[in-house]
Image: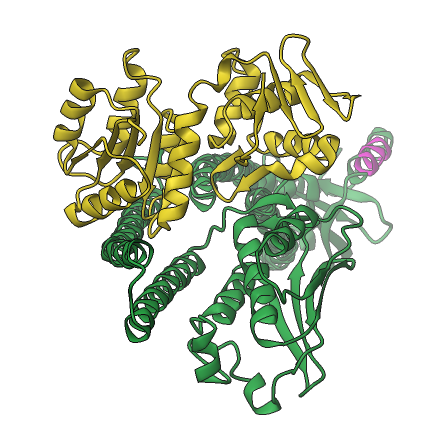
Chain colours: A green, B yellow
Amino acid sequence: MTRRDKLLSFVPLCLAGLVLIAMFLQFLHLIQFNRSYMQEEQSELQIFTKQIIWAIKPILDRKDYVTLNKYCNDFNDDEIRITIRDSKQKIVADSKSKLEFADHNIPKDTADDGVTEQINNYKETVKDKMISYETSIQSASGTYQLQLTISEADVMNTLLKAQYNIILFFIAGFILVLTIALYITLMVKIPFNELQNSATRIAKGDLSETISVPATGILHELAVAISTMAQQLKNQINDLQKLENFRKDFIANVSHEIKTPLTAILSAVEYLENTFQHYNEQEKKCLKIISDQGTRLNALVNDILSLALLESRLSMSSRNFEQFNLTNTISNAVNAFENLPSDNLPQINYTPDNEIILSGDEHLIEQALNNLISNAIKYSQSKIIDIKALQASNTLKIIVQDYGIGIPQEDVARIFERFYRIDKARSRALGGTGLGLAIVKSIVTLHNGTINLETAPNQGCKFVITLPVNE
Amino acid sequence: MAEEKILIIDDESAICELIQMNLEAGGYSNIKTANDGANAVKTIFEWLPDLILLDLMLPKIDGLSICKQVKNTPQTANIPIIILSAKSRENDIVEGLEAGANDYITKPFSNKILLARIKSQLRNTSNASFDIINYKNLSINFEQRNVKISGITVDLTYSEFEILSIFARHPGKVYTRSQLLALLRGDDGFDIAERAIDVQIVNLRKKLGEYGKYIETIRGIGYRVKEVQDDQTR
């Protein structure tokens, strides 16, 4: 379950909770209402009692129980029950039962049983919770107790009848709210998931498919925005690709255009050198200068092209690296120098031991090694060049070390700059372009690595390339 | 004077002239030049040269198309082609080699190297008919499919022997990785990575010992067997 799914299911739960809380509050309110309703009822009873007292006082004064009962029986259909007792706690009138009286003031003897029965009945009826109000009446014929009672259940029933609809309404509301919330959640969730899939696809660089834009729905604008963004990205990538192709074509064309006349010049000079044997010293020198400078120009074109290509690759996000065996690459680079026909070539030491697999551009790494080794051969005057590859847990160090003249401290900081030479005259004489170390640095940077130089005059140079190793 | 017919195809007439001068100085007299693709194709099929020096960037018909056309026509398929390139398009070279070109030289080139490569290509056209090739202590017997160094049999796998024989039969010819791969799997189309060829080559070099160094790696292109001068065959 994703975070969004959790959040989305949280929404209907929250709504349901809110509705439940509202229901609870309403319930509390109802109880409160009922309670105050009861109180109101009681005070009403009080007022009612006063009215009744006013009405029955003259009857009681006359001790006319028959009239009293008639009066009380008028309330028979009412919810209020009126009971009147004499000073001996004997019921003399009750609205819910008819008492027979022999004469106006003395109850029949037989009526005694009836009254007792009535009292029993009364008790039975009193089992319900009652709201009652009692008061005593001082009349000419004695003291009487007047009791007015209403069954609470009756009141509650009336109340509940009215409140039943409210509760029903709330339950219906609860179900409705829950359904709507679930529906909205689903309405959001489905297009949301689709959009997320689309966005993930775009993030992975797949811009081929178009995004399904829901015609209506809450995510319409977002989908349109993402769709537009993808289209925009596609256009920009196309533009970049065009630009990159243009740049590559341009580099290729420049290379071709410069090399064609160079080929002609060098070829012509070589022909002249080989064909005629009768040159004087000056002429020979001139031919050598043309040939050397042509060769140098060619090296320069190659190095500038290498740098341009490296830079264009540095600006791209994808490197297109492959895994290769570094041990083989170093061996190849070393072998290339050992086969060179030169008399005072230094001894190059490299012991290929265990296999080191590196992810990168094999040709570029070999070119970097080439440049470092050829620098050491050209400038260090060292008799020995040591090459080592050391693998640590997550880094790889390639070390090219000589034991020659070293580099003065003030030059170390600038040694990787383009066209920076320590000894300009000497460098040119040896055919250097001044770009070798700049190319090495670019290659190392392309591989997310670093290059360091440890050196001191007459202590040799130690170039350390540190490359990150994935896995 | 060698009488081999050599056709130089380059859009730069100065380079054509210079190559012609150098070849003439090197002993080849039967030379023609062509400055554009259409002219080149016409000359190839009318004149039927023994060797073609081909620049890739040409007006009208580009070098790659010419290479394919020559190699796909039975009449001209055996004419060796050396690509002359400013190396600006490494892919073009690879495509050219895969279309059947025998070798390539990058501009600017040394005339000596050019002459040496031309010589090697002209000599090697007939090398494929030998049953046994001997060089120093190395002996390759194509019929019995075995390789001996100083009389001791070298144990090669099927693939390694195939690679070695194609190299030995066509010394100096550059093979791209995918060419070697196609050779090994025929046209069955097993999808092996091109890098797998590197492994085969490494093993082959190890097994051949001191002769292993004759197999040259050509950066970004492929492999070839170095030309040897005192090549004794019988």
Q: Is residue A283 above or below residue B63?
A: below
Residue A120 belongs to magenta span = yes
Does residue A364 appear left or right of residue B150 in this picture? Answer: left
A264 or A140, which is in the foreground? A264
Q: Residue at x 57, y 18 (%)?
A: B184
Q: Quadrant of the N terminus of chain A?
A: top right
Q: Is residue A167 above or below residue B152?
A: below
Q: Is residue A268 above or below residue A112?
A: below
B155 or B130, which is in the foreground? B130
Q: Determine the residue located farthest toward the top in the rendered image.
A: B143
Q: Residue at x 50, y 46 (%)?
A: A320
Q: Which residues are magenta?
A: A116-124
Q: Position of residue A158 (x, y in %)?
A: 58, 39
Q: How many dots with numbers?
A: 0
Q: Position of residue A75 (x, y in %)?
A: 60, 39
Q: Main secondary structure of the magenta part?
A: helix
